[in-house]
Amino acid sequence: MLNDIRQYPARLSGNLQRSGRRLCIWLLLLLSFSAVADEPLQVTVQDAFINVHNGAGRGYPIFHVVERGEVINLLKMRTDWIKIETSRGITGWIKRSDIFLTLGPDGKVPEFRDTERKDYLTDRFELGAAIGDFDGADALHVNLGYRFTKNLSSELRLSQNRGAFADSDIVAIAILHQAFPEWRVSPFVGIGAGRLKTMPSATLIQTEDRTDDMLQANIGIYTHITRGFFMRIELSNDYILTSRNTNQEVNEWKVGFSVFF
Amino acid sequence: MESRFQRVFLVALLLGLLSASLSATAADKRATSEDGELDKIITPDLERRSIKESDLDSENFEFGLFYGLFSVEDFGTNEVQGVTFAYHISENLFAEAAYGLSTLQKTSYELLSGSVQLLTDEERDLTYYNLSLGYNILPGQVYISDKWHFDTSIYLIAGAGNTHFADKNYSTYNLGGGLRFYATDWLSLDLSMRNYAFTHELFGIGKKTNNLEGRLGLSVYF
């Protein structure tokens, strides 16, 4: 009870801060991704001690330790760091992985995902962005994917190519297959189909915009960096079904990153 | 007169005491009745809450507004404003999308010749967007007093995007760096520089330009 009273001002200021922040976000974005729990999330330290840093990064000095049996409040998480508050009102940051050295009120280790790749195989959606080269033109790509199984996924691709003689946009859908999704460096193959809209530079070539169908074949690799974050390198062979007599073949490469969620 | 005031005060005091004692007894009654009920109920075990990652508020997204000066080769130094949206992947890496707006000035040729106009007013509106990857290369802290410190971070950033002006799109690569100052966990000030490189053919031949931007921004994390 006494403890509760002592914690009250800290909790109150925490609440005020939280509501202030929420207000800001609501004003700025009109939507909030944060689900702020009203009651504090309390865990009990189960290791000999956990280091508390004064900033969310490994280089920041350790200014405090929480010992076995000490109850700490979890306040928020930023990348791989968790902000905590001790019963004496000291706030600081602990490593995300140190959460596995604590127990929740139910006597179990908190359910936090490991930062290993395998823990992100269950995430369904992928959002990626890449830069590349499309037949000499600078290309920008974004893709949104959906995983049916851990091996098979589909994706929507949007590309924008800016060339010396023509600009072009590509919209395509594709199916990707990863044979070894649990590998840190995991290869994939894919096939896709889409539309290519070409807009020749008006000053150079007097032609109209044209739209052609295209087919794509891809190979590439995903490299796991941290949590749901991957680097993606890809080679694509595009076959453009033109209205002219001959079809056109273009090789493009892309390098970018993807987030699974 | 005095006695009248006294009477008014006394009545007010009496009324106050009466209402206070009434509410107190009411509260007592409520308390005793609750206790009575509680005694009858077998108290269940305390709720044993399990802690999940989703219960904890994570702040990996950043939304920012910025204002600065953008020097566009041949078109003067102009005000620029824009928005940024970033996702912090790890303590070192972040991905950022940016959108900026600016207006170009007349080239010196246009000014000197007097009558020549290369671009219409509409074509002088410049917009750009880009996707970049940043790296917090020098994380640090500044110490104001014994108990007061702020986190800072010097970062490098590079990416690609698009610049639109003169009714045309130019593929643009950007490279830059900046200093981020965290006023609180969720609010930061950003002082940064960017260089935007693109090639345009407005003067007949392809011209590679490097365009510097200095800006000051404010970001919230959520």
Image (tube, coloured by chain):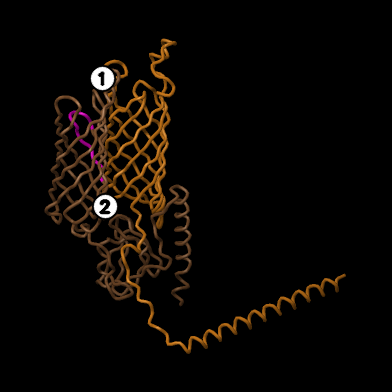
Q: Are marks 2 and 1 in contact (CB under 8 Å)?
A: no
> Hey, which quadrant is residue A138 in on the image?
top left
Instruction: Give the magenta range.
Output: A128-138
Q: State the predominant SS element of the stretch in magenta.
A: strand
Residue B53 in the image, given as x and y percentages of width and height: 31, 63
Residue B59, image x, y percentages: 35, 54
Q: Is residue A56 above or below residue B71?
A: below
A11 above or below A141? below
Q: Dot 1 falls on which chain?
A: B
Calculate the distance from the C-alpha at mark 2 to the C-alpha at mark 1: 41 Å
Q: Is residue A189 above or below residue B20?
A: above
The answer to whether A133 appears left or right of B181 in the picture is left
For residue B206, the mark is 1
Disc 2 marks which amino acid? Phe
Measured along the vertical axis of the image, is residue B124 above or below residue A187? above
- Residue at x 36% of width, y 70% of height: A42
Chain assignment, label 2: A
Query: Which of the chains is brown?
Result: A
SS under mark 1: loop
Q: Nearer the viewer, mark 2 or mark 1?
A: 2
Residue A109 visible in the snapshot: yes
Q: Which mark is residue B152?
A: none
Residue where numbered disc 2 is placed: A125
Badge 1: how crowded within 10 Å, few (<14), some, or many (20+)? Answer: few
Residue A131 among those drawn in magenta = yes
Quarter holding the N terminus of chain B is bottom right
Asked if one can make out residue B137 in the rendered structure from this viewpoint, the answer is: no
The part of the image, by quadrant, that contains residue A161 is top left
Q: Nearer the viewer, residue A143 or A249?
A: A249
Q: In the displayed structure, does residue A72 sit left or right of residue A227?
A: right
- Chain identifier of the orange chain: B
